[in-house]
Image (cartoon, helix red, strand yellow):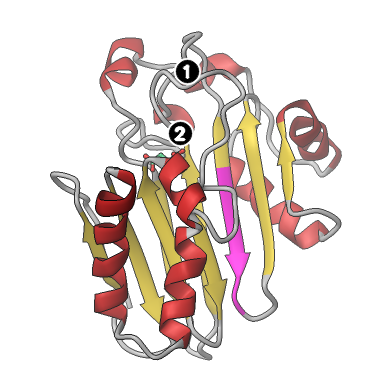
Amino acid sequence: MEDEPLLNAGVGACLNADGEVELDAGVMEGATLRAGGVACVRDVRHPVDLAAEVMRDGRHVLLSGSGASRFARDHGLEMTDPSIFINNRKRQQRLAGADTVGAVARDADGRLAVAVSTGGISGKLPGRIGDSPIPGAGMYADDLFGAVCGTGQGEAFIRLGLARLMVVELQHGMDPAAVAKGAVALLGKAMQAQGGVILIGRNGPPHAAFNTQAMPFATAQ
Ligand code: ASP
């Protein structure tokens, strides 16, 4: 999805206030609670792969900016000229930071995971970090309870610790569909924020909820 210019990630990412692209991505593995996040990345072709490499490396959870780029080079990830991410300036400027991409998954053995990648919010200040690379804010996965991914105003997700909150609600036995709906209601009520979530529990189908006009999502078995 980072290769799809229609989506706010990779080559379709929105522009910051300086007209440049700074990418965030995160991954988490529910079996081990290992997580990796990268922020303000400008020259890595696939930031979500870099987030996975940070997770596998295991020394840290979050890397940003030039340090994240150096880590990417050292670990043999594909680097690119930052201009590749700016393919249709006008269209990218129009986007209000929507269309972050994310996925939650459960495999046949019940292992859960989440991955998310984004350009963040259109017109953001250079150096701004959103919720997507932060475990507990924009994403979370725990095999015992569920996996969650969010999209929308990242500052609100961070302030609410929303992804972790949702997993705690699953832990307390709440119905996954109600957890998804409740999270979006909280976004609107407590933060006057817009967004959406996708979620999958230990059993049953995935769920989605949003208070934006639309949030395209798909499921696969
Ligand atoms: N949540 C992302 C961010 O704030 C943006 C989005 O989901 O569209 O960086």
Q: Does the residue labelled 2 lie within 8 Å of ligand 1?
A: yes
Residue at 70% x, 78% y: name it: 32
SS state under label 2: loop
Give the amino acid at mark 2. Answer: Gly
* Rendering coords of residue 53 (x, y %): 73, 53
* Rendering coords of residue 150 (x, y %): 40, 55
- Determine whether 91 is above or below 76 in the image: above
Residue at 67% x, 62% y: name it: 35
Residue 150 is inside the magenta segment: no
Give the amino acid at mark 1. Answer: Asn
Residue 25 lies left or right of residue 65; in this view the side is left
Q: Can residue 1 be seen?
A: no
* Res. 203 image quadrant: bottom left
Q: Quadrant of the N terminus?
A: top left
Residue 52 lies left or right of residue 4; in this view the side is right
Q: Quadrant of the C terminus?
A: bottom left
- Determine whether 51 is above or below 29 in the image: above
Residue segment shown in magenta: 25-30
Q: Nearer the viewer, residue 20 or 122?
A: 122
- The quadrant of the rendered image in which ligand 1 is seen is top left
* Rendering coords of residue 23 (x, y %): 55, 32
* Residue marked by disc 1: 16
- Determine whether 94 is above or below 210 in the image: above
Chain-order first, disc 2 or disc 1 = 1
Query: Label for residue 120?
Result: 2
Residue at 58% x, 51% y: name it: 26
User: In whole angstroms, how far apart are the C-alphas of marks 2 and 1?
Assistant: 8 Å
Tell me the crowding category of disc 1: few under 14, some 14 to 19, or many 20 or more residues within 10 angstroms, Cα based. many
* Rendering coords of residue 117 (x, y %): 49, 45
SS state under label 1: loop
